[in-house]
Amino acid sequence: MRNNGDEEVIKKATITKSDNNDMTRKGALSVRNVTKIYDPEGVHVVALENCSLDIKAGEFVAVVGPSGCGKTTLLNIIAGFDSLTHGEIYLDNELLAAPGVKPKPGPDRVVVFQHGALFPWKTVLDNVIYGPVIQKKMSRSEAIEIARDKLSRLGLKEIENVYPGQLSSGMQRRVEIVRALINNPLVLLLDEPFRGMDSVTKSASHEALLELYDIFHKTIYFITHDLEEAIFLSDTVVVMTTRPGKIRMTIEVDLPRPRDYRMLSTPKFLELKEMAKDAVHEEALKAFQRGERELA
């Protein structure tokens, strides 16, 4: 990942992984000088300001920063849920968002939210196949075959006839990610999907997501407040400033894949965590101090 602005960039080392398909892999995002201003009733809130970054096809990027720094705003613009005020966003060199361009969600970008969106009255299998069948992109039998293959790869085949209400929150998120993958998107947009989980469930969810990433190698934009989670999962950690959101720093994660929890106690992991912690703490302090002045 490359930061296009004048922001501080910390580069550690190139991650060791197979890049044999880099020339043909799709899903590269380019965010160019993006500004987003909300102006309800003349309030004029600048959520993002001159925000620039490049995400390579197949890269796992975790975005961290203080609450309200624009992480989710940028995700929503990429997803096609919101417009931007200035700047441009490209997906594989094709214009995705720009001033005057109507926001348009698409199957090439799929979002998984924190609170989930599974249909409680449908089984796991029926949830997974719903999108491509209702959109008539696949026959029901074709969708079932593909869904069962993906569920099996993530150890979920045994629950295909179970309803979401019978599953843990971690298992539900895994099903949602499989549901996203059946559409073969170029980009997965994950908005704090594991927030609020207990430590055991979160650990299992991390392992499942890492396995999924190693198998399917999709471009991932992952929002989190958990620095340990960000470093453990991603290729690159992006630290955003307090509002208006800019890219303060990018940290390349020099940890080999596949990963396991033994890495959490290694000197390299702790070094990266401390680096991210210092940057986020400084931005959170700025946000707190600014809030005190605004309330005064």
Image (cartoon, grey):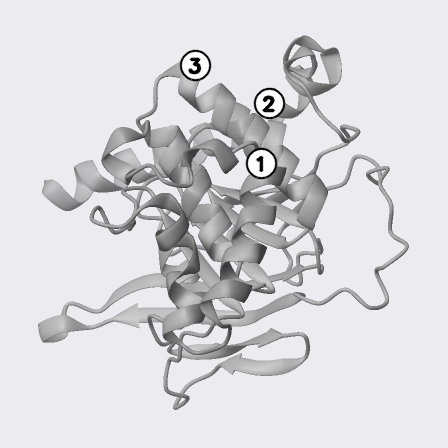
Task: Please provide percent x and percent y for residue 39.
Answer: 20, 73
Determine which quarter of the picture holds residue 15: top right
**For mark 2, what is the residue?**
273
Q: Residue at x 40, y 76 (%)?
A: 135
Residue count near mark 1 (Cα–Cα under 10 Å), binned few <14, some 14–19, many ≥20: some
Disc 3, SS: helix
Frontmost residue, 156 versus 112? 156
Residue 210: % across, % down: 62, 34
Q: Could you say which quadrant of the image residue 187 lies in?
A: bottom right
The residue wearing badge 3 is 200
Vertical order, 127 against 287 (above or below)? below
Mark 1 and mark 2: Cα distance apart in space: 28 Å
Element under label 2?
helix
Of circles 3 and 1, which is in front?
1
Tell me the quadrant of the picture where the C terminus can be found. Answer: top left
* Image position of 25 with respect to 229: above or below: below
- Cα distance, mark 2 to mark 3? 21 Å
x%, y% of residue 189? 48, 54
| Residue drawn 76% across the image and 28% down it | 255
Residue 50, label in figure: none
